[in-house]
Amino acid sequence: MTKQNPSQKIGVIGLGLMGTAITERLIENGFVPVVWNRTRAKADALIDAGAQWSDRPLAECQRVIISLFSSDVVREVLPPMLVDLRSGQTLIDTTTGDPRDSIHWEQRLTFSGAFYLDAPISGSSQQTREGQATVMVGGQQRAFEDCNDLWPVLGAQVFHVGRCGSAAKMKLVSNLVLGLNRAALAEGLAFADALHIDLHTALAVLRGSAAYSRQMDTKGTKMIDGDFAVHAKLTQHLKDVNLILQTAEQEGLVLPISEAHRQLLQQAEALGYGQQDNSAIIQALRRSPA
């Protein structure tokens, strides 16, 4: 029996849409994911595909990826696991969360001789699964370089943007622009619909015009067809927009367009689209929501 290379065992904490996509990518690239999730049943298909379950992933893996819904969930899940933390370990947190939490966790892990990298991912779970996402990383250069074999698994482009917390901040900037591009597309399609322009024609024109954004490729047809099968949940982006506005307020900055965006997301959520794909924001803009 071939002995497993310990460096190939990568812990994964959290098996939501993104955590599942990350785990699938690890398996595809020859790693052995050692997974944990609050609902164990979510791991069944991944275990069948080659992952391993552990109640204590930090006890088994030198490097552990965290993929949870929010900073609040990280604060709930991570502390009990730190009993297994060892000097030299690296925790890679892909959660889109509060930059202040990233700084807190780095300080706490550094005290134990371990490393913490905030490494949020820009892209949907589908883009991550296809290796097309972008990863922003904040933290010590040494820890970043020690994970050079993992970065191509997590994304097509990887940016080490500075000290810990920098990546969490950059992810909020990225999500602000991304979300507004998506909302602008939804509003444009709703406007075209009201003007009785064929929506597939409208989308083709927009793609060929100066108005182009990648959201037209990933979300345009979904909006037109009402296909809200989840790549990234609307309620999760609302969480991110709330965090963007909260962080801006801390810096004394007003973001009026993002505030309007939040209201649209809240309307779509109130219409029952919170657990569906974030392209469902268009339902808040249609004259007669479906």
Image (cartoon, helix red, strand yellow):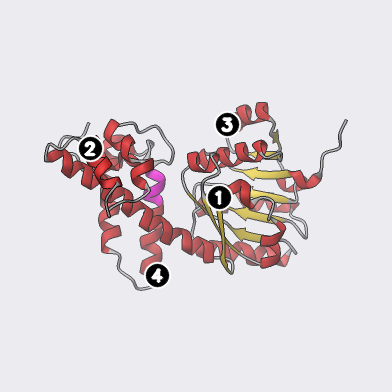
**Badge 1 or badge 4: first in the primary sequence:** 1
Tell me if residue 186 can be seen: yes
The residue positioned 69% from the left and 31% from the top of the image is 50
Q: Position of residue 273 (x, y in %)?
A: 32, 36
> Magenta region: which residues?
234-239
Q: Is residue 225 left or right of residue 190?
A: right
In primary-sequence order, the first of circles 3 and 1 is 3
**Crowd class of label 2 (few under 14; some 14 to 19; many from 20; radius 10 Å):** few
Measure how far apart labels 1 and 2 are at the Cα level: 31 Å
The spot of residue 252 in percent (x, y) is 35, 73
Determine the CA span between mark 3 and mark 1: 26 Å
- Name the mark on residue 156: 1
The answer to which quarter of the image holds residue 255 is bottom left
Q: Looking at the image, which residue sits at the far left?
A: 195
At 38% from the left and 48% from the top, the residue drawn is: 214
What is the CA distance from the residue labelled 3 to the residue labelled 2? 40 Å
Q: CA distance from mark 4 to mark 3?
A: 37 Å
Q: Cβ–Cβ below 8 Å for labels 4 and 3?
A: no
Kindly identify which residue carries mark 2.
Answer: 201
Q: Is residue 265 visible?
A: no
Q: Is residue 225 left or right of residue 44?
A: left
Q: Is residue 156 left or right of residue 267?
A: right
The residues bearing labels 1 and 4 have C-alpha atoms spaced at a distance of 33 Å
Asked if residue 112 lies in the magenta stretch, the reply is no
Residue drawn at the location 51% of the way across and 48% of the way down: 133
Closest to the observer, 47 or 123: 123
Q: Quadrant of the N terminus?
A: top right
- Asked which secondary structure carries label 3, the reply is helix
The correct choice, above or below, for 194 with respect to 245 in the image is above
Q: Amino acid at mark 2?
A: Thr
